[in-house]
Amino acid sequence: MEKPFNNLSPAQAERLDLVTEEMGEVLHAIGKIKRHGYNSFNPNDILSNSNKQNLEEKLGHLLYAINLLSLYGEVWQSRIDDYQYCRENTIKQWMHHQ
């Protein structure tokens, strides 16, 4: 069987697809908040979560997908933590309201 051009196993590709999907859902949740606010919810479904709760759920799903990449050694959590720390120190000059 011929290897795919990117040398990814089906499992690796699936994990990356999961991260991509979850990122898209986070973006969708943020779009709803930007349009309607954190506390808004679907008026046609009074049992639905608020936009804030939906964002929290989607962020949790994204973190799970990222953790899967780390669990299988495709990314290193320690490096992610290092980059997070570096970004924390460099982004401040560009943030206007924090």
Image (cartoon, rainbow, N blue to C red):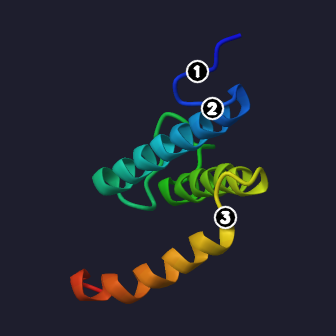
- Given residues 83 and 23, the one toward you in this image is 83
Label drawn at residue 8: 2
- Say few, some or many: other residues with alpha carbon within 10 Å of mark 3 (under 14 / 14 to 19 / 20 or more): few
Quadrant placement of the N terminus: top right
Of badges 1 and 3, the one in the foreground is 1
Q: Name the residue located 48 percent from the left edge and 54 percent from the top edge.
A: 51
Residue 13 appears left or right of 51: right
Separation of marks 1 and 3 at Cα, in angstroms: 24 Å
Q: Are marks 1 and 2 in contact (CB under 8 Å)?
A: yes
Q: Identify which amino acid the numbered label 3 is placed on.
A: Trp
- Residue at image mark 1: 4
Label drawn at residue 76: 3
> Please, which residue is most extreme toward the front here?
2
Mark 1: which secondary structure? Answer: loop
- Say few, some or many: other residues with alpha carbon within 10 Å of mark 2 (under 14 / 14 to 19 / 20 or more): few
Mark 2: which secondary structure? Answer: loop
Q: Name the residue located 44 percent from the left edge and 83 percent from the top edge.
A: 86
Q: Name the residue located 58 percent from the left edge and 70 percent from the top edge.
A: 80
Instruction: Give the image quarter of residue 71.
Output: bottom right
> Please, which residue is most extreme toward the right here?
71
Quadrant placement of the C terminus: bottom left
Q: Is residue 50 visible?
A: yes
